[in-house]
Amino acid sequence: MAISSYRWRPKSNHFRSHVLGRPGSVVPIFCSQTDAGGPVKVSHPDVRRYFMLASEMVQLVLHVAGPAKPGTMYVLDMGEQIKVVDLARDLVRLKGLIPDDEIAIQFTGLAPGERLYEELANRAEVVSPSPVERILRVRGRNPIDPVALDAQLDQLVDAALREDRDGVRRLLRRIVPEFAEDGQ
């Protein structure tokens, strides 16, 4: 989710499930699966995610909203990633049950595009502290030339309008070196 000059990271199709206290959070889902007698469903035994309370996230976003400069990217320092299976087993134990014995943990497999862990930044970015505690600033390792980028985007649009798939791929790789198509 992007808001003005802010970029929410780590990116995830299931971001709301990592904000504890929100509808769709994994905690009530795991609790209801446990209450139903199981199994508690986790995508992969090694999957790790960041978790944060909704109130904590809102407070951090409000702190950075004032001093932000247009085009500046920030990420929330969400602490250490937690293995989701450990969270599931802890919640089963809190219900007074024995995980993997009284309540099964079922691994469902990673969803398409789902990763084992989340990253605050990619190889082309640098994360550094900001003036606000628990807010990190993200910058590209190589500065972007807005004039060159504008020209490249024009070329990309032209290639897309011509339905030149190879040209679009080539231009995407030039504009975004980290670009990789699914399956490649």
Image: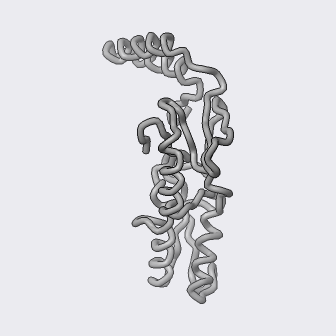
User: What residue sits 48% from the left and 40% below the top?
Assistant: 6
Q: Nearer the viewer, residue 98 or 132?
A: 132
Residue 134 pos. (x, y %): 63, 51
Report the residue that reaches farthest toward the left. 161
Total marks placed: 0
Position of residue 43 relative to residue 164, above or below, is below
Q: Is residue 123 above or below residue 81?
A: above
Q: Measuring 45% from the left and 16% from the top, which residue is drawn there?
A: 166
Query: Residue 107 in the image: x percent, y percent?
Result: 56, 65
- Name the residue furthest bottom: 96
User: Where is residue 170 shown, x and y percent of the image?
Assistant: 50, 16
- Residue occupying image coordinates x 48% and y 11%: 147
In the picture provided, is 123 more to the left or to the right than 152?
right
Q: In the displayed image of the protein, which residue is found farthest to the front?
A: 66
Say how the picture is coloured: one colour
Q: Is residue 145 visible?
A: yes
User: Residue 86 or 131: which is nearer the viewer?
Assistant: 131
Is the N terminus in the top left, top right, bottom left or bottom right quadrant?
A: top left
Which residue shows up at 57% across the image and 82% down it? Answer: 103
User: Is 68 rendered above or below residue 31?
Assistant: above
Front position in the image: 146 or 36: 146
Q: Is residue 129 left or right of residue 104?
A: right
Q: Quadrant of the C terminus?
A: top right
Residue 146: x %, y % from top left? 50, 15
Q: Is residue 117 visible from the viewing direction of this image? A: no
| Residue 106, picture quadrant | bottom right
